[in-house]
Image (cartoon, rainbow, N blue to C red):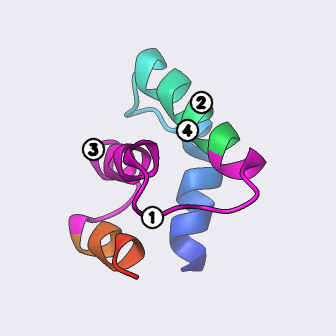
């Protein structure tokens, strides 16, 4: 969804995220951007999506939708 993409793309402007959270999100988004394909069963992918939930950028329900093929 567009609203999710905007939140994720602009996480660095969030005043509610700590510097550590922003650094982690930066790493996650760079890895997703660099990937040729996204394996939804890969542990790193699952952890990355779940971290987006932890950071408040996705809901748990949406994460389940994304990770369910």
Task: Count neighbours of disc 2 (C-alpha within 10 A) and say few if under 14, some if 14 to 19, many if 20 or more.
Answer: few
Q: Contact (CB < 8 A) between labels 2 and 4?
A: yes
Q: Distance between the Cα atoms at labels 1 and 4?
A: 14 Å
Residue shown at the point (37%, 34%) measured from the top left: 16
**Where is residue 27 shown, x and y percent of the image?**
59, 30
Q: Earlier in the sequence, mark 3 or mark 4?
A: 4
Structural distance between the alpha carbons of marks 3 and 1: 18 Å
Label 3 SS: helix
**Left or right placement of residue 15 versus residue 27 in this view:** left
Disc 3: which residue: 54
Q: Is residue 23 above or below residue 16?
A: above
Between disc 1 and disc 2, the foreground one is 1
Location of mark 1 (residue)? 40
- What percent of the width, then of the height, locates residue 3? 54, 72
**Marks 1 and 4, the one that precedes in the sequence:** 4
In the rendered image, residue 24, in percent from the top left (x then y), is placed at: 49, 27
Cα gap from disc 2 to disc 4, whole angstroms: 4 Å
Disc 4 marks which residue? 28
N-terminal label among 2 and 3: 2
What residue is at 65 percent from the left and 40 percent from the top? 31
Q: Determine whether, in the image, residue 37 is placed left or right of residue 3.
A: right
Secondary structure at badge 2 equals: helix
In three-dimensional space, the C-alpha distance between marks 3 and 4, rounded to whole angstroms, equals: 13 Å
Q: Quadrant of residue 1?
A: bottom right
Residues in magenta, as a range = 32-60
- Residue 2's disc is none
Residue at numbered disc 2: 27
Name the secondary structure under disc 4: helix
Tag 3: Cα neighbours inside 10 Å, few (<14), some, or many (≥20)? few
The spot of residue 65 in percent (x, y) is 34, 79
């Amino acid at each position: 969804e567009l609203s999710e993409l905007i939140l994720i793309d602009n996480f660095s402007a969030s005043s509610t995220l700590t510097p550590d959270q922003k650094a982690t999100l930066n790493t996650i988004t760079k890895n997703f951007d660099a990937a040729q394909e996204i394996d939804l069963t890969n542990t790193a992918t699952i952890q990355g999506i779940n971290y987006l939930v932890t950071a408040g950028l996705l809901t748990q329900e949406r994460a389940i939708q994304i990770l369910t093929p």
